[in-house]
Amino acid sequence: MKIYCAPTQQKKPNMLSYQHGYHAGNFADVIKHTTLTRLLNYLIQKDKPLLYLETHAGRGIYDLKNSQALKTAEAEQGIKLLWEARRELPTVFSSYMQSIRLLNDDNMLRYYPGSPCLAIQALRSQDRLFCCELHPGEFEHLQQLPRQNSRVFFSNSNGLEQLNALLPPAERRGLIFIDPSYEIKTDYRQVPLFLKNAYLRFATGVYCVWYPIIDNKLHEQLLRGLKNIGAERNLRIEFYLTTAKKPGMTGCGLWIINPPYLLSAEIKQVLDSLRKLFNPGVSSYLLEAC
């Protein structure tokens, strides 16, 4: 099934230079984190425990009033548009918006939950959460995130390299969330290689990979590698602010291995809603089971 809905100067790459605070709550975060909450919602419906493994965790909670967020103001065209429309959103956004409400007063949006925070809020006492973050400053913030139970672990390490050590999990069920910055161009080649090895070790896991869509088409190299993994069921999700060629990120995507069967229909509702909020009349999306 395939659904298509139509109509700076670069710094030298440094694997420890990226800080997500400049981009927290932007349109890509909304798409990524809404999908993540739906995946978590499905996986906790079964009583059996699961492992949530995140390879690039960031700091966990972001202050949209700090200097980083204010400098770029990307949240203005992202989560703030959803926050203003929160009473009219379909129920598919409920878990995501509830997580945001837990961090904020009813009438003011200031704090944005990163994926570790969303996972901690969603998971149960029998589940295990393991979040990796290599950047020392971001890891220091991550360690301050309330853990809620003893089965939450934070590691100052390369998350891709941890895949071999942690998979297959003792729980035999798991969600692996891979969200690099892609500031280093080799990530587009390395991520599928690490993921293919992980899939061979743990073929029943649910894997979710986020990627940016940028003018140089590096994401196409990533997609070729992801298709080469050989998984039987994949879901490709892409949202485009514009299809015009412009510098920087014009869209983003998610590649999900072993997606829950009802996820595609739910994500279509999400994307239909976001087209009305994010660059309306111009934005579009692709939703493809492959």
Image: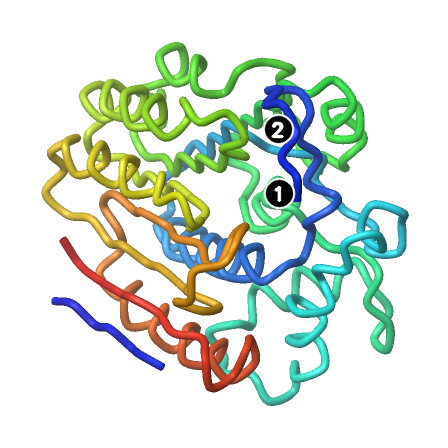
The x and y percentages for residue 38 are 43, 60
Kind of residue at badge 2: Val
**Left or right: 142 with respect to 114?**
right
Q: Quadrant of residue 220?
A: top left
Q: Can you say which quadrant of the picture contains the N terminus?
A: bottom left
Q: Quadrant of residue 157?
A: top right
- Local packing at callout 2 (Cα closer than 10 Å; few below 14, some 14-19, many 20+) is some
The x and y percentages for residue 210 are 43, 44
- Helix, strand or loop at label 2? It is strand
Relative height, residue 109 to residue 223 (above, below): below
In front of the other: 162 or 173? 162
The x and y percentages for residue 18 are 66, 31
Judging by the rendered image, the residue that carries numbered circle 1 is 120
- The residue under the point 54% across, 45% down is 123
Label at residue 152: 2
Relative height, residue 77 to residue 6 (above, below): above
- The residue under the point 50% across, 27% down is 55
- Helix, strand or loop at label 1? It is helix
Mark closest to the chain's N terminus, 1 or 2: 1
Q: Tell me whether circle 1 and circle 2 mark residues in contact (CB < 8 Å).
A: yes
Count of numbered tags: 2
